[in-house]
Amino acid sequence: MSDALFPRSYDVIVVGGGHAGVEAALAAARMGRTALLLTQNLDTIAAMSCNPSIGGVGKGQMVREVDALGGEMAKAADRSSYFSQTLNLSKGQAVRSPRAQCDKAAYRAGQKAAVESCAGLDPVQDEAWALWTEGSRLRGVVSRRGTRYEGKTVVLTTGTFLNGLAHVGLRTHAAGRGGEAPALGISASLRSLGFVLGRLKTGTPPRLHARSIDYSRLERQDGDAAPKPFSHFTRRIDNPQLPSWVAYTNAATHRVIRENLDRSPLYSGKIEGSGPRYCPSIEDKVVKFPLKERHQLFLEPEGWRTSEVYLNGMSTSLPEDAQRALVASIPGLEDALLTRCGYAIEYDFCQPTQLTDTLESRLVPGLFLAGQINGTTGYEEAAGQGLVAGVNAALRARGEAPFRLGRDEAYLGVMVDDLVVRGVDEPYRMFTARAENRLSLRADDADLRLMEKGAALGLVAPEARERFLRYRSLVLEGGEAPDAELEPWSMATVREQREIRAAYEPYISRERAGAERLKAAELVELPEGLDYAAIGALTNESRQKLARLRPRTLGQAGRVPGVTPADLQILWVHARSR
């Protein structure tokens, strides 16, 4: 193994080219830092490994927030979307969530082009094998072939690749996802530095060949007649639109599943990791809801120029023959050809309570973690963490103050706080119900909440910022302006936002008052070296958890499971005395 030093050094090294890695690398480079994106395969940058969609309840709001801060996901979704919907349209604006199905190849190509065209960002194909440290100092990463990449900060965004193991029935093979090798060195490197790792699992359904499907026996579903863009910077969507199709399981499907549970890695004990509660396998659905006569399935095209169809709702790791039998039991799919079998993927993750609220490691200064390595699931959660980690890595590389978002400012703030304070025991997924301030964290006002912050970071172009400020002034202060002065915004969007704000103002005022009371606790910082073991008035559980999690503020301490109001009073006294 060689020990060559790569000829360039960087402010930020990003390991992994998925949705988190792309946002982290782009953010760092756009902030004027030198950045390296190190990935096993440059052809799979931002690959949509599972569902061909972006957004959803809670998730769509986060995509809008990433966009308002200057991220790339929303633009990529708009360029490649073929089916768009606003979910919960019959409900209030607070829970309305955008979702789009995208051409996988077009989405990936768009993100790859964004990376390759970004000044200051070097994409390199190589496999990170270990973190390069000297004592307690982080120097960069070492690749499998022995190349040393030097960087002031490192962002790990390894997805499901850490010691990844794919399951189809009782057969297993090492994989990061279908057809790709796992990352085998980083886990050992993290453990050697003192990190606690666990195992999680996720899964994916079979893909079908469109030609083999009898669509006449399925229900057609069309997207919105006038698709709304995800990105604040997209004027309109002119892409060709495609329908999705709805099917249902039945008694025969459920019988196939029950008869093959002994060959399921989920129910034979072969899989150790916990799976996502809100995206269960078809086996879980049938076992846990035995009285439910049918489960809904969605057949979603994977793009404009492919015949592969994603069978949404039938995530499974049953053996191949059982998968063929259960697909054939669905009306319309009797002769369906499985182009790819479903599988479960089991992988290592780092408990995110080992991070600060900037997603920086407490153990190794300058090391940031983002995406599924932190125990989350979903492209949107990954992209949001990638942006936060990339921004903070860029700031740390130059010794600047960190960037934080509060729970009252963004779903991104809710997610990061949930992860680093509460940790995870199953893959974390965002929902609107997780946010106590969801009336003011809507998809429609993400720009009003966050775009000025993105501009201050250098992620929103000056000309875009000027138009946004003009738009915001009209929304908040009244007046009229020609659309040409506001593009991509318009007086139509100004009037719509005025109406929404007027309708919600009484409720938001009440919510804001509660948020202000909570914010008072967030501003009380706890001393970094506070010896919780010496505070005898705390409960034993609180002393142990607070010593392990090291909350930064009194507000964070209050969200640690097991910490009581009496404990908070005691901590407040200690904080004041310091």
Image: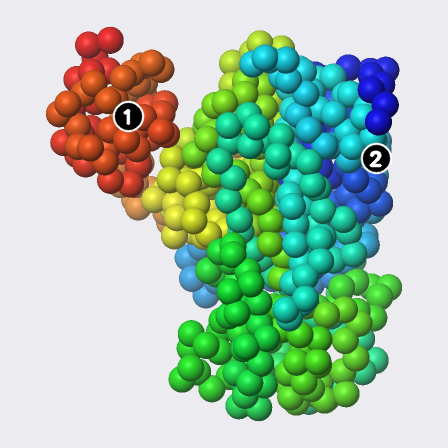
Q: Quadrant of the N terminus?
A: top right
- The way the protein has been coloured in the rendering is rainbow
Viewer-nearest residue: 514 or 145 = 145
The amino acid type, in three-letter code, at marker 2 is Gln
Instruction: From the top left corner, tell me how far across and down residue 199 is, in percent.
Output: 53, 49
Instruction: From the top left corner, tell me how far across and down residue 31 is, in percent.
Output: 68, 20
Residue beneath the point at 57% across and 72% down: 264
SS at circle 1: helix
Q: Tell me the crowding category of disc 2: few under 14, some 14 to 19, or many 20 or more residues within 10 angstroms, Cα based.
A: some
Residue 554 numbered tag: 1
The amino acid type, in three-letter code, at marker 1 is Leu
Query: Where is 226 relative to 527, above or below?
Result: below
Horizontal side of residue 383 vs 106, given as left or right: left
Horizontal side of residue 90 vs 384, given as left or right: left
Horizontal side of residue 299 vs 416, given as left or right: right
Instruction: From the top left corner, tell me how far across and down residue 403 is, in percent.
Output: 51, 22
Instruction: From the top left corner, tell me how far across and down residue 88 is, in percent.
Output: 48, 62
Q: Tell me the crowding category of disc 1: few under 14, some 14 to 19, or many 20 or more residues within 10 angstroms, Cα based.
A: many
Regarding residue 155, the answer to whether it shows in the image is: yes
Regarding residue 327, the answer to whether it shows in the image is: no
Residue at label 2?
125
Query: Where is 435 relative to 315, above or below?
Result: above
Disc with the residue nearer the chain's start (1 vs 2)? 2
Q: Are circles 1 and 2 on residues that touch, CB within 8 Å? A: no
Residue 222 numbered tag: none
Query: Where is 229 relative to 125, above or below?
Result: below
- Of tags 1 and 2, the one toward the viewer is 2
